Amino acid sequence: MEFGRGQFFALLSLVVTGYLQLCVYYPLILVSRQPLKEIMRLYFDFSASRQPYGKEALSLMSYSIRQQAVLFDLTVEFWLTLSDKDQQSPERLEGLNDTKAAAAMLASSALDYLNLHQQFDQQALILYSYELGKTWPELFVHLPKAERERLLTKVIQLSENHDLDEVQKTLSELLPVLTKIHEGIG
């Protein structure tokens, strides 16, 4: 699957914009957003047959997953301080739903990178799968039920069919954790 630079930056923008509709941390996000985009431009070269900074690019994707999970944790804390009326505000609910949809796209894209065998070397993919195994549950818990189900299916397929045994093993170990989260949330 080819995931272009424009799609990646559009997705990143959607994640950040959706979050900003909810968040009191808006000034902090504005300050930190631009450097991250610049780093991504340096590390990801989707026109190259092989990523020149593959390990760094995948680490940056892992970092993005972790940051999105942290943003959701902050959002939950903020949400709990709101009155019932504010929690039911159409704008806030729309922002929350948009943010969850964007996070699901980011999570799905993170898995897609595992299939880019031609662009990333084996060791980088193995390390990346390990990093996803550690960070993914923190984001997975915040996703809508339908997205969790779709992503669980994707993890199952990768854990059974990925070309690298180490990636299969990591995802096989991740699967029960995600399943327990999914069943616990309902």
Image (spheres, rainbow, N blue to C red):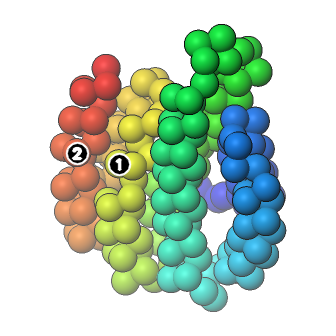
Query: In which quadrant of the rendered image does the N terminus lie?
Result: bottom right
Up/down of 44 relative to 173, above or below: below
Label placed on residue 180: none
Report which residue position mark 2 lands on: 177
Q: Residue at the spot x=72%, y=78% of the render?
A: 39
Q: Position of residue 83 (x, y in %)?
A: 61, 18
Which quarter of the figure has residue 4? bottom right
Report which residue position mark 1 lands on: 137
Q: Residue at the spot x=64%, y=37% of the render?
A: 99
Taking depth in this image into account, of 58 and 39 the one nearest to the observer is 39
Circle 2 residues within 10 Å: few <14, some 14–19, many ≥20: few
* Count of marks, rendered view: 2
Q: Are marks 2 and 1 in contact (CB under 8 Å)?
A: yes
Residue at the bottom extreme of this rendering: 52
Taking depth in this image into account, of 106 and 30 the one nearest to the observer is 30
Query: In which quadrant of the rendered image does the C terminus lie?
Result: top left
Q: Position of residue 75 (x, y in %)?
A: 57, 39
